[in-house]
Image (spheres, rainbow, N blue to C red):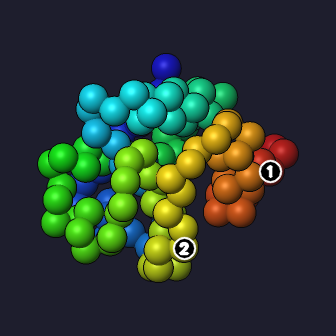
Amino acid sequence: MVILQETTNKQLEQENFLLYIYTPFCGTCSVARSMLDKIESVHKQEIFYEMNASLHPKFMQEYKVESVPCLLIKQDNEIKEKVYAFKSIANIYSLLLDYKPELFKVQ
């Protein structure tokens, strides 16, 4: 089973990433995480980084993250979206089609 990996400062410096931001005792975060876990297990690879918001208040303030759960999407060294309502796995897949199209290429 693939598990979301806790992010590092080096990863946050990358030009492109999908960052799942949560707090440990947030019920909605738990539901959101299970959606991301399912997506990663289908693709058998790590797609999302994760960050415990409680441990990174400076980051939360700098990137103006308003609430958790949040899927922060960085592409071409710029924050493209902050998704607060995960809604469904299908909704997350629609974002992946835009930001990680390589996941859907037939080999």
The answer to whether residue 11 is seen in the rendering is yes
Residue at the (64%, 63%) spot, across then down:
99
State left or right for residue 56 relative to residue 33: left
Work out how far the residue at label 1 is from the one at label 2, CA to CA, in angstroms: 23 Å
- Mark 1, Cα crowd under 10 Å, few <14 / some 14-19 / many 20+, is few
State whether residue 92 is above or below residue 39.
below
State whether residue 86 is above or below residue 9.
above
**Which mark's residue is nearer the viewer, 1 or 2?**
2
Percent x, y for residue 91?
A: 70, 46
**Residues at circles 1 and 2 in contact by the CB criterion of under 8 Å:** no
Amino acid residing under circle 2: Lys
Residue at the (32%, 71%) spot, across then down:
63
State left or right for residue 9 relative to residue 93: left
Amino acid residing under circle 1: Lys
Percent x, y for residue 33?
A: 47, 33
Percent x, y for residue 87?
A: 64, 41
Residue at the (41%, 35%) spot, across then down:
29
Q: Secondary structure at mark 2?
A: strand
- Mark 2, Cα crowd under 10 Å, few <14 / some 14-19 / many 20+, is few
Q: Which mark is residue 80?
A: 2
State left or right for residue 5 relative to residue 73: left
Using the rendered view, name the quadrant where residue 90 is placed.
top right
The answer to whether residue 102 is seen in the rendering is no
State whether residue 73 is above or below residue 86.
below
Percent x, y for residue 71?
A: 48, 53
Q: Which mark is residue 105?
A: 1
Q: Secondary structure at mark 1?
A: loop
Residue at the (34%, 33%) spot, across then down:
26
